[in-house]
Each structure stands twice: as C-alpha cells, then as structure tokens.
Amino acid sequence: MNNEYQYSFKVLGSCIGCKTCYRACPVGAIQTGPIRIDQDACIRCGKCESACPGHKIIKA
C-alpha cells in the first residue's frame, strides 16, 4: 500500500461479485474472481465505494 494515504478501501466478504466497482474504477485497481482491490494501484478516489450497490466496499 502506498504510505502517503491514511486509509485504504476494503471489499467485505459478503460481496456478491456484480463487478460494478470494477467498471467504476478509473485506474483498473479492482481485480475480479474474487473481487479485491490492488492497494498499490488504488488512487483512493472512492468511486468503487460509491458505485457498490450493496455497500460492500468500505474505507478501512
């Protein structure tokens, strides 16, 4: 994880795998099967969190 950020985003285990977050990520930091966030690629924009219809992505 890039140390300049004080937080990261985490996908909860109850994610249903709809891939809405994957499509919303502007830098391709969401990986599928199962859904996870590449913390080194993530720019902490929060678009994945906002896009998730089940609110399964949280700021950690």
Image (tube, helix red, strand yellow):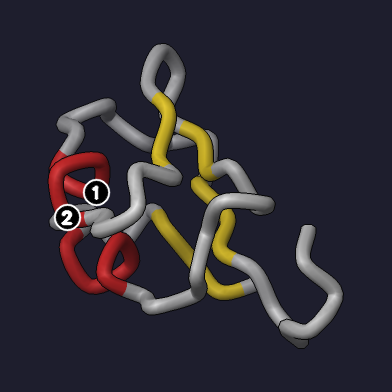
Comparing 18 with 28, the one in front is 28
Q: Are marks 1 and 2 in contact (CB under 8 Å)?
A: yes
Screen quadrant of the C terminus: bottom right
Which amino acid type corresponds to the residue marked 1 in the rendered image?
A: Cys
Q: Is residue 20 above or below residue 35?
A: below
Q: Quadrant of the N terminus?
A: bottom right
Quick check: 56 left or right of 10?
left
**What number is the disc on residue 51?**
none
Q: Quadrant of residue 19?
A: top left
Q: Badge 1: few (under 14), some or many (20 or more) residues near its Cα, within 10 Å?
A: many
Residue 20 percent across, percent down from the top left: 14, 44
Q: Is residue 20 left or right of residue 46?
A: left
Where is 25 relative to 8, above or below? Answer: above
Q: Residue 47 in the image: x percent, y percent?
A: 26, 70
- Return the x and y of residue 3 as percentages of the image width and height: 85, 75
Instruction: Look at label 2 and name its amino acid.
Output: Ala
Give the secondary structure at mark 2.
helix
Q: Which mark is residue 24?
A: 2
Please count the marks in the image: 2
